[in-house]
Image: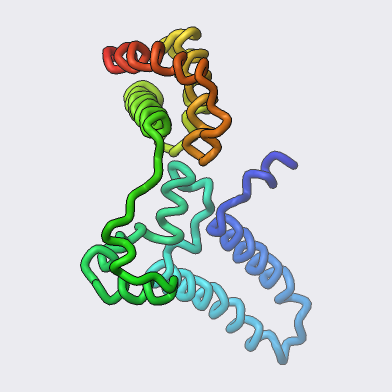
Amino acid sequence: MTEKIRNISNPLTIIAIFAALAEINATVSIGLVDKELQSVFIWFVILFPTLLVSLFFLTLNFNTKVIYAPSDYKDDQSFHKMLVGDPKPDKEINVDKDIIRKTLDELGIKKKDTQDFHFNVSENVNYLFSVRYSMEKEVRRLTSKYLDDERPRPVMMMLPRLVEEGVITPTQHKVIRNLYSISSPAIHGDDHKLTLAEMDFVKQIAPGLIDELKKIE
């Protein structure tokens, strides 16, 4: 009995149960109502389900999404897409110069200050970013091809599953994690923590590893 109650998660099921219980109670109660009020009560029993069905179809027509539970959708992404709709690309940022000017004004930045700006990024950080980008690109390609999972997940969560499926080896998994642990602090602005030994490890190992991942078809 408890298991059946737990399975009631859909709004449609709740509406159906409510309507059925209301009609059963009304039918049983007819004999207990005074004869003077029976005609009114009978009309209520007739009109109530009619009103309920009408409201249901109006909701179905104008606001369909509210009558389905999250579990009725294929996955969380489909439910989220239904709930908020497709994200609209912010194309006006690329074409509307007023937005750029307004943003610069709000930040107190003069446009001429941005024309000759150079990012102070070291060669090692650029190299680590390239390694990180290339590894993640290949891991996501393999995940998309071999794992039946459309949800976006962190790379570190996808690696064990790729090992389980035999797509990558445990050694490759271990090396990828090591390369990530070295590159992450530098990419996030803590490049002062990077040692010469770590940088040498990345330069010696990363090119061959990335080449191996690219060869996995």
Q: Residue 3's spot in the image, x, y percent?
A: 70, 39
Q: Residue 29's spot in the image, x, y percent?
A: 74, 73
Q: Is residue 26 left or right of residue 76?
A: right
What is the quadrant of residue 18 in the picture? bottom right
Q: Residue 25's spot in the image, x, y percent?
A: 71, 68
As drawn, 79 above or below 40: above
| Residue 201 visible in the picture | yes
Seen at 48% across and 28% down, the residue is 183
The foreground one among 19 and 146 is 146
Colouring scheme, one of rainbow, by chain, secondary structure, one colour = rainbow
Q: Is residue 89 left or right of residue 37?
A: left
Residue at the left extreme? 95
| Residue 143 visible in the picture | no
The foreground one among 148 and 177 is 177
What is the quadrant of residue 61 in the picture? bottom left
The foreground one among 161 and 54 is 161
Seen at 73% across and 87% down, the residue is 35
Seen at 48% across and 45% down, the residue is 76
Quadrant in the picture for the N terminus: top right
